Image (spheres, grey):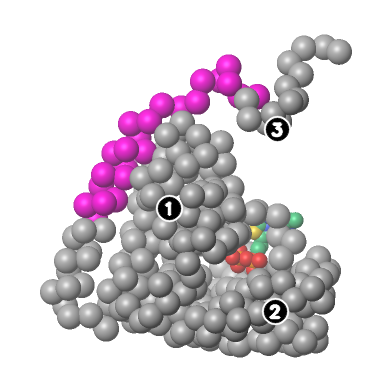
């Protein structure tokens, strides 16, 4: 489905927003161990990109990846159970926040190894081979201005788009706070790829509304001036998408999302934790078994 659908886009950004807020509550309650990297503020990108993809298209995400999994169509209840480490989770509670996968909706999994960050040589190697072999892969850079506490200006020489164009790949920049704009630019790139085109890059400019990681809620790092945070938060993808709906339709979506998440929290917390005796299960592909004793 690639046509414009304001209701669907709003529903997705609202679902991700409230999912993340619920997940933060569950971190505080000790139900999600280890914390999360909240996607708050960046919802418009996952929503816009995935609205331009088919179910069969494959996506892979990052450590800040809950929004990608939800926007691609995974069940929020099973995703939340995964974050809570329950056997009812998408990956039996073994992937958790940073490794959630759902092959059924084309989510290969989040990858928390930062090999794709724009200053890694690995990214340039991937760009080179993708361009050389004309692989139909869309690279989406969610430029939120920071890597943890490091501002992009202090770490990135040249431009992000320039890294792609150096390999002959088309590159587009888009306002990542506007899910419809993201959907449009993605749909155009995907159409070129389906017609035989090679890889492309989209740099979606955005702002991380919350902490790099929930651990930051306990320690003040003070790397972003309050005026900058206020300015960043003033362009909220939920409001931008919501303003395109009739207020009654918006309220209806909000209520439906809330009911879905109430049920998701209940489902997540009702699931059992994995039996410690099964800790070594699923570590090896079939044919190999984990060694549990000496020798
Ligand atoms: C290979 C590797 N080195 C270091 C880390 C630790 N780490 C986790 S998130 C992060 C910063 C990522 O910044 P960015 O790619 O800009 O994504 P953002 O957090 O802004 O979404 C780092 C260094 C990691 N996950 N993997």
Q: Can residue 15 be seen in this view?
A: yes
Does the Cβ of the disc 1 residue fall within 8 Å of ligand 1? Answer: no
Residue 279 within the magenta-colored segment of the rendering: yes
Q: Which of 207 and 248 is in front in this view?
A: 248
Q: How far apart are marks 3 and 1 (CA)?
A: 24 Å
Determine whether, in the image, residue 220 is placed left or right of residue 131.
left
The residue wearing badge 2 is 198
Above or below — where is 252 with respect to 191? Answer: above
Res. 285 mark: 3
Which residue shows up at 28% across the image and 77% down it? 242
Q: Distance between the residues labelled 2 and 3?
A: 33 Å
Q: How far apart are marks 1 and 2 (CA)?
A: 28 Å
Quadrant of the image for the N terminus? bottom left
Above or below — where is 144 with respect to 94? Answer: below
| Magenta stretch bounds | 258-280
Q: Main secondary structure of the magenta part?
A: helix
Q: Give percent across and percent down for residue 290.
A: 73, 22
Other residues around mark 3 within 10 Å, as few (<14) / some (14–19) / many (≥20): few
The residue wearing badge 1 is 74
């Amino acid at each position: 489905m690639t046509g414009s659908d304001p209701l669907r886009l709003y529903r997705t950004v609202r679902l991700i927003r409230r999912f993340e807020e619920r997940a933060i509550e569950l971190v505080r309650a000790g139900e999600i161990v280890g914390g999360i990297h909240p996607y708050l503020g960046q919802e418009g990108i996952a929503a816009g990109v995935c609205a331009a993809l088919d179910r069969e298209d494959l996506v892979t995400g990052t450590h800040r990846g809950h929004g990608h999994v939800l926007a691609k169509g995974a069940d929020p209840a099973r995703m939340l159970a995964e974050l809570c480490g329950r056997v009812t989770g998408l990956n039996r509670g073994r992937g958790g926040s940073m490794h959630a996968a759902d092959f059924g909706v084309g989510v290969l999994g989040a990858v928390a190894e930062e090999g794709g960050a724009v200053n890694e040589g690995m990214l340039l190697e991937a760009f080179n081979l993708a361009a050389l072999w004309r692989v139909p892969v869309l690279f989406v850079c969610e430029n939120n201005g920071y890597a943890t506490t490091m501002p992009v200006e202090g770490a990135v020489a040249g431009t992000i788009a320039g890294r792609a164009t150096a390999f002959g790949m088309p590159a587009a920049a888009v306002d990542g706070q506007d899910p419809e704009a993201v959907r449009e630019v993605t749909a155009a790139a995907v159409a070129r790829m389906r017609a035989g085109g090679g890889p492309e890059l989209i740099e979606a400019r955005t702002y991380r509304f919350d902490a790099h990681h929930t651990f930051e809620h306990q320690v003040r790092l003070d790397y972003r001036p309050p005026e900058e945070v206020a300015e960043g938060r003033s362009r909220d993808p939920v409001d931008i998408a919501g303003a395109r709906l009739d207020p009654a339709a918006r309220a209806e979506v909000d209520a439906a999302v809330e009911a879905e998440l109430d049920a998701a929290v209940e489902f997540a917390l009702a699931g059992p934790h994995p039996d410690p005796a099964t800790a070594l299960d699923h570590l090896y592909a079939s044919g190999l078994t984990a060694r549990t004793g000496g020798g």
